[in-house]
Image: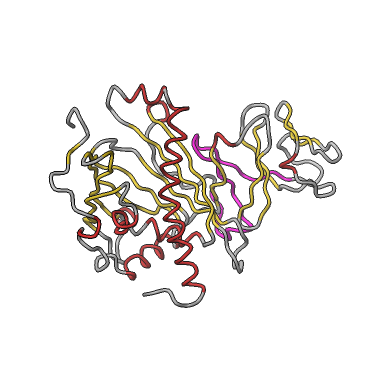
Amino acid sequence: MGRIPLRLRRRPVAWDRQRSTWRAARPAVIASAVKRARARPSGNWYVVAAGRDVRSDSALGRNVAGVELVLWRDAHGVAVAGPGACPHLGAPLKDGVVTCGTLICRWHGMSLNGRSYAGWEPLPVHDDGVLVWVRLDGVGGESPTEQPVVPVRPAARSSLSAVYTGVGACEPEDVVANRLDPWHGAWLHPYSFVDLEVLTAPSDDVTDEDDVLLVDVAFKVAGRAVVPVRAAFSAPEPRTVVMRIVAGEGEGSVVETHATPLTEPGAARPRTAVIEAVVAASDRRGFAIARAAAPLLRPVMRATAGRLWRDDLAYAERRWALRSQGRFPG
């Protein structure tokens, strides 16, 4: 790897003069990739929040597939999740007070320490260090697994992570389809991506290990300055798409996009949360400075993701609207 990751584009191409990608972005290819992703097991696990959002001093309320949840950390810092309604008279536990790892309901003072009590039952939780997952067997309908399918990430001690959350009027498959269509990157997001070329797109009979979209793309920095990388897109489970940098600056870094349904299956107006974890790593000595400045950089990383998802959620919502009317192309 060179000393300086930046490159100068010799002959920048205007947005309207770049090579079109609509012929390569065949609807059948994208639909097949989504179908293969949906066929993979999830073990009934759903990403619900960034690990930093689940705290030991306050409760967090979430809805997943129409199920009301509450999350907090117990006296040992372990993430706890369970029904969001108090079993006594249905009070919202997200409004409760957490003291020394115990959640106290505001209505009548029922105390929950994370274990079964008075009809309240905790749910299986997995905290992977970046995200918190909850297992909902009554919703997923699959054979449960002990842990979710968590993508391989750079080691926490040598990486910088940030989590963005956005919500759109669509279903998880619309978010997954958006991420399994890298061909739109330089057209829909010209402020971030240029010189995008999809090198390989898998066929229907591909194995899980080879079910990868390989892409060359350059991230825009300023003016003609770009950072070229090679990225691999894969879907390890039905609601997750991973972009991994396999060559170039930040090799090994990942962007995990998790699509979590908020409304119950079959809802007339579905809503889906996009919970995206960016886990960046670099072997450059200066990256240690970036890690030290993590509290300042995380809001910037979230804002960058938010700008992209402002466009991509509109894309996903449009896809759902067409599907719901039976007018989706392909």
Q: Quadrant of residue 38?
A: bottom left
For the residue pair 43 and 154, the one nearer the viewer reads as 154
Residue placed most toward the observer, 167 or 9:
9
Query: Height in image: 233 above or below 25?
Result: above
Given the current orientation, which residue lies at the most extreme bottom position? 326
Q: Left or right of 99: which side holds 256? A: left
- Residue 131 among magenta residues: yes
Residue 113 vs residue 187, the one in the foreground: 187
Measuring from the top left, give residue 243's x and y in whole percent: 35, 47
Figure check: 197 above or below 101? below
What range is drawn magenta here?
Answer: 121-145
Q: Residue at x 29, y 65 (%)?
A: 25
Nearer to me, 244 or 15: 15
Instruction: Tell me residue 175's x, y (percent).
Output: 45, 58
Q: Residue furthest right?
A: 108
User: Total label count?
Assistant: 0
- Quadrant of the drawing holding the N terminus: top left
Relative horizontal placement of residue 158, taking residue 164 as reference (left or right): left
Q: Which color scheme is applied?
A: secondary structure
Left or right: residue 148 compared with residue 248: right
Q: 199 left or right of 92?
A: left
Where is residue 118 drawn, in percent x and y?
Answer: 82, 43
Quadrant including the C terminus: bottom left
* Location of residue 272 by image quarter: bottom right
Residue drawn at x 42%, y 31% is 297
The verdict on residue 163 being magenta is no
Q: Position of residue 59 (x, y in %)?
A: 68, 37
